[in-house]
Structure formats: structure tokens, C-alpha cells
Image (tube, rainbow, N blue to C red):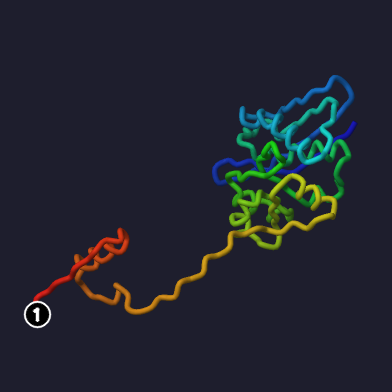
Amino acid sequence: MGLAIIHSRASVGVQAPSVSVEVHISNGMPGFTLVGLPETTVKESKDRVRSAIINSNFQFPAKRITVNLAPADLPKEGGRFDLPIALGILAASEQIATDRLKNYEFVGELALSGGLRPVKGVLPAALAASKVGRHLVVPHVNGDQAALVGKEQHKSAQSLLEVCAELCGQHRLNLYQTPKRKTVEKHGRDLQDIIGQQQGKRALEIAAAGNHNLLLSCLK
């Protein structure tokens, strides 16, 4: 038997209330029960979590698994709890280290392969995690949003396996950010330098946007 508690965040408008993902594994008829007022999309996470754990080369416990999303009166929706549920199962079954879990919060939807897919509401979750002094681990694609709060404090991962390696001290996660595009230097004059001539400037903009031919004529 084992018990693990993983910290996560719900998404309610612009707020990110704290959610404790409590996982208990006990002897008895194998089963997977999810409680705590979950919506349909959250209930579907059971199949995603099972496949993600197996495809990440871990063992899915053939025991009675109970997952509670607390507080129970807070509605939960989306796949954002997939990652914390999977980590809770691995921690309760003693397949990953648990001593560092208290310093982290997790959000992320799991693919059947164990990869992480983006979720909504990462920015409020990152802000809330910063206030309580925890690292928020998000999917790679959400890295830009978490970076708006703190590049050094929060982390991103591509898969469940990467997150487990971070918790076990085998791999260090960083915060992924989309490479910035190079700024194109402007040469020559700008249309803003021309005073008046609104119709002419409008014609130039349309021609440039649509790659149209253009002929300008004027009286001497």
C-alpha cells in the first residue's frame, strides 16, 4: 500500500486555485477510481494515464487505485491533471523518488505515448506557483507562457519520462522558449514620413500586401 500527494492547479477564469492530487494504492480487486467532482474529460484521463505509464517503461500497478482531486467542491475539467495523476501513481507505487515532490506543481495532458501536450491557463498557474515558492512543470509548448513569470523558477518537459528523470536527479529540466525571430533592419524611407496622401499610401499598402502591380501618375 502507498499514498502520494501531488500539487497541481485548476483553471477557473483568470484564477488558478490549488488542487491536491491524492493517490492511494491498496491491495484488493484491481481498479482505478477517480473522485473529487471531475468532469468527463478528467474521467477519460484514466486510459491516457495507464497507457502513458506503460509506454514510458514503468509498471502500472495491478492493485486498487483511488485518486482524489481535492478540494472536492471545485469543478475540474480538461486534461491538465493527467501528469500529476501519473506521477502520483508512480510515487505511491515507489517507482520514482518522492522527497522532491513537495517543491513542484504539475500541469499537462498526456499522450498515449507518454508525451506531454499543451494545456490552457498556464500563466495564472505559474503566477500562483511563484507566490508559494514552488516550481511549475509544464508541457514544452507552454514554456513561453511560464517564462513571462520567471525563466529560472519554472520548467518544461516533453514527456512523462523527462519529468521523472528530473525528480530522480538524473536529468535537469529547463524552460523551453520559442526562438525569437531576427529583427529585419529597415532601409530607406517609411510611409509614416509622408504627410497626407492617405489614398496613395493606402494603395501602396494594398499592392505590397497582395503583391500587385502598381502604377503611380501625377500632374507636373
- Image quadrant for the C terminus? bottom left
Quadrant placement of the N terminus:
top right
The residue lying at 66 percent from left, 62 percent from top is: 151
Residue 178 point in image, percent of width and height: 59, 59
Task: Locate residue 186: give its quadrant.
Answer: bottom left
Local packing at callout 1 (Cα closer than 10 Å; few below 14, some 14-19, many 20+) is few
Query: Looking at the image, which residue is at 59% across and 52% down?
Result: 123
Q: Is residue 46 left or right of residue 186?
A: right
Up-down relation of residue 150 to residue 33 (above or below): below
Return the residue found at the far left.
219
Which of the 4 image quadrants contains residue 13? Answer: top right
| SS at circle 1 | loop
Quadrant in which residue 32 is drawn: top right
Question: Which residue is labeled 1 in the image?
Answer: 220
Give coordinates of residue 117: x percent, y percent: 63, 44
User: Would you say 170 lies left or right of 85 here?
Assistant: right
State the residue at coordinates (71%, 30%).
Answer: 46
> Between 204 and 151, which is closer to the camera in this rendering?
204
Q: What amino acid does circle 1 point to? A: Lys
